Image (cartoon, helix red, strand yellow):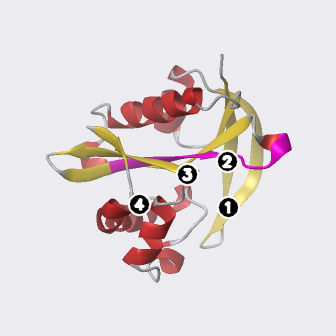
Amino acid sequence: MIIQLTGQHAKEYRELRLQALLQNPEAFAASYEEEKELSVEAFQARLDIPYLFTFGGWIEEKLVGTVTLIPQQKEKLRHKSDIVAMYVDPRYRQKGIGRKLMEKAIQKAGELKEVEQLLLTVVESNANAKSLYTSLGFKPYGLEKKALKLNGVYIDEEYMKLEMN
C-alpha cells in the first residue's frame, strides 16, 4: 500500500530514513551522523510541510520504502519538481515497491498544474535505480563528476529528467 505520509508517521519515517542513510550512505547528500541527531518532532515537521509530498510504501503495517516530491516554489522554477530520498529496505526490493512509489510521485506531480518536468539524481553506478527510472520515462541529461565525497571516495551522480505531458 502506498500512501502520503504525514506527521503521524514521523517515528516510522525517521527509523527508515536512518536505516537508508546507514545502508546506502552513497545514495544521499545527508549523512546518518547529521540526521540521527534530529528528533521525531523534526521529522514530523518535515512531513507536515504543505508543499512537500512524501510517500510511503507499507507491507503488513511496516514502512518499507519512501520517496519525496518537492515542487519548486520560486515563480521561475514552478514548472519543475524534484524527486528525492528514494529508498526501499533491501529486504523488500524487487517486489515492485520502488516502482509504485515512483508512480505515485509522478501521479502527484501530474496533479500539480504547473509541473512540466520531474528531476532527480541517481548515483551513476546504481544500475537498478537507473533501470527503474528509465523504464518510467526518465532520460539522462548530465553527469556530475565528484558530486559527493564519502570517506575520501568521490561519487558521480547522473541527472535524469521526465518531461510531463
Would residue 54 be counted in the magenta stretch?
A: no
| Residue 123 seen anywhere in this rendered image of the structure | no
Three-letter code for the amino acid on which mark 2 is drawn: Glu
Q: Earlier in the sequence, mark 4 or mark 2?
A: 4
Name the N-terminal-most of marks 3 and 4.
4
The stretch drawn in magenta includes residue 71: yes
**Residue 52 disc label:** 3
Q: Residues within 10 Å of mark 4 (few under 14, many from 20)?
A: many
Q: Earlier in the sequence, mark 2 or mark 3?
A: 3
**Image point (27%, 53%), residue name:** 63
Query: What residue did someone put label 4 on?
Result: 20
Q: Disc 4 vs disc 2: Cβ atoms closer than 8 Å?
A: no
Q: Secondary structure at mark 3?
A: loop
Q: Is disc 4 placed on a helix, strand or loop? A: helix
Per the rendering, the mark at residue 148 is 1
Most distant residue in the left direction: 60
Asked if the residue at tag 2 contacts the one at tag 1, i.e. Cβ–Cβ closer than 8 Å, the answer is yes
Q: Nearer the viewer, residue 106 or 26?
A: 106
Q: How dense is the environment of label 2, judged by Cα within 10 Å: few (below 14), some, or many (20 and up)?
A: many
Residue at position x 46%, y 79% in the image? 38
Q: Position of residue 165 (x, y in %)?
A: 66, 16
First reached walking from the N terminus: tag 4 or tag 1? 4
Per the rendered image, the range of residues in magenta is 65-76
**Residue name at image x 79 percent, y 49 percent:** 74
Q: Position of residue 159 (x, y in %)?
A: 70, 39
Residue 96, quarter of the rendered image: top left
The crowd level at tag 3 (other Cα within 10 Å; few <14, some 14-19, many 20+) is some
